[in-house]
Image (cartoon, rainbow, N blue to C red):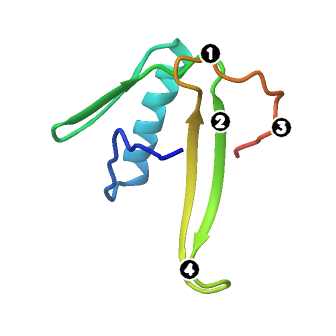
Amino acid sequence: MPEEVLFKSESPQSREEIAAYLRSVADKLESGEAITLSAGGESVTMEPPARPTFEVKAEREGPTGGSGELSVEFELEWDEGGEGGDAADSGLSIE
């Protein structure tokens, strides 16, 4: 199935700025509100269900053992029009 990018934003930010964005998303998730992403003239509003799938990934791109690019990705997934998954707790811990 092809992927359709509905919104994308990428720019250097301070750790404090990134924390503020993540805190805003966390507050919206906790209160059950929709999440609106906007930058420039683009905007998209999404309403995650009560139990979306939460994926956390740490990656290194580039040569093995070399100086590549590191990333941490946080992703919420759900079926469009669905209520989310009923998967058991994965035991994820973020410290």
The first of marks 3 and 1 along the sequence is 1
Q: Is residue 6 above or below residue 9?
A: above
Between label 4 and label 3, give the one nearer the viewer: 4
Look at 35% across and 38% down and name the residue there. 6
Q: Which residue is mark 2?
A: 54
First along the sequence among labels 1 and 4: 4
In the image: residue 39, left or right of residue 26: left
Other residues around mark 2 within 10 Å, as few (<14) / some (14–19) / many (≥20): few
> Could you tell me the amino acid type at mark 4?
Gly
Spatial separation of the CA atoms under disc 4 and disc 3: 29 Å
Of marks 2 and 1, the one in the foreground: 1
Q: CA distance from mark 3 to mark 2?
A: 12 Å
The residue that label 4 is drawn on is 62
Q: Which mark is residue 83?
A: 1
Q: Secondary structure at mark 2?
A: strand
Mark pair 2, 1: CA separation: 14 Å
For residue 16, above or below residue 30: below
Q: Which mark's residue is nearer the viewer, 1 or 4?
A: 1
Q: Does residue 7 appear left or right of residue 73 in this picture? A: left
Q: Amino acid at mark 3?
A: Gly
- Rendered image quadrant of residue 89: top right
Of labels 4 and 3, earlier in sequence is: 4
Specify the amino acid type for callout 2: Phe
Q: What's the residue type where badge 1 is placed?
A: Glu
Q: Kindly state the secondary structure of the residue where label 3 is placed.
A: loop
Left/right placement of residue 69 relative to residue 10 reads right
Mark toward the start of the polypeptide (3 vs 2): 2
